[in-house]
Amino acid sequence: QKEVEQDPGPLSVPEGAIVSLNCTYSNSAFQYFMWYRQYSRKGPELLMYTYSSGNKEDGRFTAQVDKSSKYISLFIRDSQPSDSATYLCAMSQINNNDMRFGAGTRLTVKP
Amino acid sequence: GAGVSQSPSNKVTEKGKDVELRCDPISGHTALYWYRQSLGQGLEFLIYFQGNSAPDKSGLPSDRFSAERTGGSVSTLTIQRTQQEDSAVYLCASSLRWDNEQFFGPGTRLTVL
């Protein structure tokens, strides 16, 4: 079993839809949870960052962490074609630079 | 300002040849990471440099892989006697310190024929 599991998709939605992206993990020591967005032929860029459990909202994006279930989510409201990219979850432990990434979910938002 | 740059952007080589991949981190960033991204796989950590400390090589898949960071800045990832399974995108990232956000370069797409 991989340490971080993420459905690679692909996921295709119409413009304006709410998108839900998810990851599960097995290491209960993870405390930092991140979502990266990666456009084609580009490097990943940090989108959202959450420490421990709870929700964090930034514009159309909401990140949720449920440590009891070892489950994290990224919600995108009013999705736009420009949101079409691969979304990778990542997580790490306290005082540990070793980040573990999910496989990434490829999202396409159709106009 | 300038972000992380990597060269070449694409590299096609024959099985058994050696390749060198270059990473120019953001100026002033003390931490530098190399990752490998294979199709359908997440980013696989390879090696980490922090300042003048000994690098963390725990992610290197075999002794054919090595990396250097000269003068605390530019880094080179070398793959000797390349194999077809080495085909992947090799990403470099840098951060101000080990616990800060990592900024990624565009990657080098390596194809081993």
Image: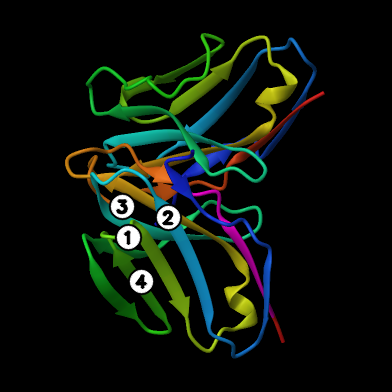
Magenta region includes residue A106: yes
Most foreground residue, A27 or A94: A27
Observer-side mark, 3 or 1, equals 1
- Tag 1's secondary structure? loop
Place of residue B86 in the rendered image (x, y in percent of width and height, measured from the top left): 66, 24
Q: Which corner quadrant of the image does residue B73 belong to?
A: top left
Rendered position, A56 above or below B59: below
Quadrant location of the C terminus of chain A? Answer: bottom right
Does label 3 lie on the same chain as label 4?
Answer: no
Q: Which marked residue is nearer to the observer: mark 3 or mark 2?
A: 2
Q: Residue B98's quadrant in the figure?
A: top left
Q: Secondary structure at mark 2?
A: strand
Highlighted range, magenta: A102-109
Chain bearing tag 4 is: A
Residue at x 50%, y 46% (from the top left corner): B105
Distance, label 3 to label 1, CA atoms, is: 26 Å
For disc 3, the marked residue is B101
Image location of residue A37, percent across then percent down? 50, 62
Give the spatial CA distance, label 3 vs label 2. Answer: 22 Å
Circles 1, 4 touching at the beta carbon (< 8 Å): no
**Marks 4/3: CA distance?**
17 Å
* Image mark for residue A69: 1
Q: Which residue is mark 4?
A: A63
The Cα atoms of the two marked residues, 1 and 2, are separated by 8 Å
- Counting residues from the N terminus, which is met first, the one under dot 2 or under dot 4? 2
> Looking at numbered disc 2 in the image, what kind of residue is underneath it?
Thr
Q: Position of residue B15 (x, y in %)?
A: 77, 15
Amino acid type at mark 3:
Glu
Q: Residue at x 70, y 29 (%)?
A: B87
Q: Are marks 3 and 1 on the same chain?
A: no
Marks 2 and 4: CB-CB under 8 Å?
no
